[in-house]
Amino acid sequence: DAKTTQPPSMDCAEGRAANLPCNHSTISGNEYVYWYRQIHSQGPQYIIHGLKNNETNEMASLIITEDRKSSTLILPHATLRDTAVYYCIVRAMNRDDKIIFGKGTRLHILP
Amino acid sequence: SAVISQKPSRDICQRGTSLTIQCQVDSQVTMMFWYRQQPGQSLTLIATANQGSEATYESGFVIDKFPISRPNLTFSTLTVSNMSPEDSSIYLCSVGGQTRVKTEAFFGQGTRLTVV
């Protein structure tokens, strides 16, 4: 079973920051938080991952709470192309580990 | 990053027949993963394919229905056998990252299967 809980859907106005929450209260000490997104008719795409520190890359920022039981993915300036299903996943940092997907959050960017 | 090619990209098949989906990676990988995505749903892991050994299937999936081959480190096939309309889904293959630092998974574009 997936180890994460996400809201099923969210709306965000174009140009605004999209903040996608994720609860992972049973996360283990060696597990990382990964975010992927799936744009319609495409395979999932990696966005970002982190252990306990906040992370930022060219796509997004990841904020992880101090107790690591929840996190927030931030898309700083959402565009229509960010409309997708976003998946929050916890897994150990081993490239051969399988990924178990939850239901994800369907993000709608509104023009 | 890893580039994954899946064939076919889509197909329409008659019930009772079988379809073999191919997954080719541009680099050698230890594990390959096969997923199913039913309409409007999330991805469900079918099995993990390790070169040189039998695939490991997740609960609810069996080898007779979804036989998998893994002849080398860059290629795998998934067969959907004796198809029924309930098998209509997108099937995706995935591989793990190729360096110790880059551990994110990569996914093919999927095979959209419709069974009529």
Image (cartoon, grey):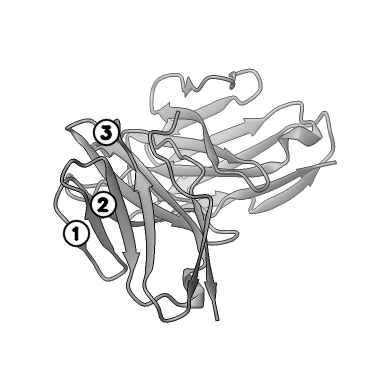
Going from N to C along the chain, the mark reached first, 1 or 3, is 3
Q: Which residue is mark 2?
A: A49
SS category of the residue bearing label 2: strand
Where in the figure is residue A36, as x and y percent of width and height? 40, 53
Chain identifier of the residue bearing label 2 in the image? A
Label 1, label 3: how far apart the Cα atoms are: 18 Å
Asked whether disc 1 touches disc 3, contact meaning CB atoms under 8 Å apart, the reply is no
Task: Give the structural element (helix, strand or loop) at label 3.
Answer: loop
Measure the C-alpha gap from mark 2 to mark 3. 14 Å
Q: Chain of mark 3?
A: A
Q: For the residues carrying marks 2 and 3, which lies nearer the camera in this image?
A: 3
Residue A100 drawn at (x, y percent): 43, 35
Q: Are marks 2 and 1 in contact (CB under 8 Å)?
A: yes
Q: CA distance from mark 2 to mark 1?
A: 7 Å
- Disc 3 residue type (three-letter): Ile
**Residue B73, horizontal then vertical, whole percent:** 37, 37
- Give whichever of B18, A77 is nearer the camera: A77
Residue at mark 1 shares a chain with residue at mark 3: yes
- Mark 1 or 3, which is nearer the eye? 3
* Helix, strand or loop status at disc 1: strand
Amino acid carrying mark 2 in the image: His
Q: Is residue B70 above or below residue B89?
A: above
**Res. A27 mark:** 3
**Horizontal side of residue A16 vs B16, given as left or right:** left
Q: Quadrant of residue B81?
A: top right
Q: Residue at x 49, y 43 (%)?
A: B93
Q: Quadrant of the C terminus of chain A?
A: bottom right
**Mark 2 or mark 3, earlier in chain:** 3
Q: The disc numbered 1 marks a residue on which chain?
A: A
Identify residue type, mark 1.
Answer: Glu
